[in-house]
Image (cartoon, coloured by chain):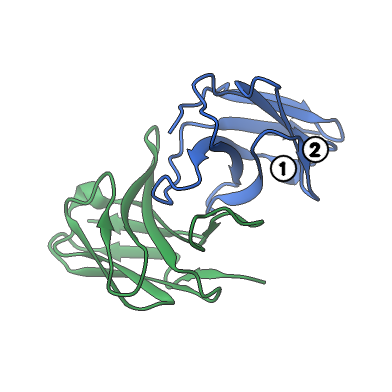
Amino acid sequence: DVKVTQSSRYLVKRTGEKVFLECVQDMDHENMFWYRQDPGLGLRLIYFSYDVKMKEKGDIPEGYSVSREKKERFSLILESASTNQTSMYLCASSPPGGITPYGYTFGSGTRLTVV
Amino acid sequence: DAKTTQPTSMDCAEGRAANLPCNHSTISGNEYVYWYRQIHSQGPQYIIHGLKNNETNEMASLIITEDRKSSTLILPHATLRDTAVYYCIVRGRNAGNMLTFGGGTRLMVKP
């Protein structure tokens, strides 16, 4: 079974901490994405990557950065966590173009609470 | 990408067909219709997609109207495990590879 694995299911961090959210996919996909999901706001794209060492800003990149040193791993970094970054974070991957029998594959999500 | 309109919520009896509508009246010729669902506390799951022909797979059927301005996702025999939020998404093949999720339809399957 193809998989997108997010390293943590739940995280609690303190305000001001540097936070790393890790995502690994085993499908050799070129494209990887980070979304956040909040009640009433749906899923919003933070950053995405088309290839190793390549990144593009999504709709809400402020306060975040990303790293893609290897094809299978895409990390989301909160440089200095704030309470308004408390959210569910979802990682996804897809082949180029995204038109595949399986579409986009999402991880199970990381629920981050910043206190 | 074309915007979509879906009902906020729907109920369906277990074992019956669930028909989830989606309006995408501004869809353009090269845009596909995707359906995803999200079960509580999990990531979205791909269900099906189509361009203009009706499509069927092991999970569902997708019926797209001839003018492509609307579509219906059909779960032929809904089970309690189909309770989820269902998202209808329209995007072009080369639209930056991004999916834009709207509010979706919260489907409640009841015994």
The reply to whether residue B21 is in sight is: no
Verify CB contact (< 8 Å) between mark 1 and mark 2: yes
Percent x, y for residue B74?
Answer: 76, 33
**Left or right: B62 in relation to B37:** right
Residue B73 in which image quadrant: top right
Give how far across and how far down residue B50 sits, in percent. Answer: 66, 40
Residue A96 percent across, percent down from the top left: 48, 61
Which residue does the numbered mark 2 point to in the structure image? Answer: B78
* Res A54 → quadrant: bottom left
Chain B hue?
A: blue
Q: What residue is shown with label 1?
A: B82
Marks 1 and 2, how far apart at CA: 6 Å
Q: Is residue B60 left or right of residue B77?
A: left
Residue B40: assigned label:
none
In the image, residue A73 sits, relative to residue B40, either above or below, namely below
Rendered location of residue B10, percent (x, y): 66, 24
Kind of residue sitting beneath label 1: Asp
**Is there any visible trace of residue B87 in the rendered image?**
yes
- Tell me the quarter of the picture where residue B63 sits: top right
Q: Colour of chain A?
A: green
Residue B77 placement, left or right of B81: right
The residue located at (39%, 58%) in the rendering is: A33
The numbered mark 2 sits on a residue in which chain? B
Q: Are marks 1 and 2 on the same chain?
A: yes
- The amino acid pointed to by label 2 is Ala
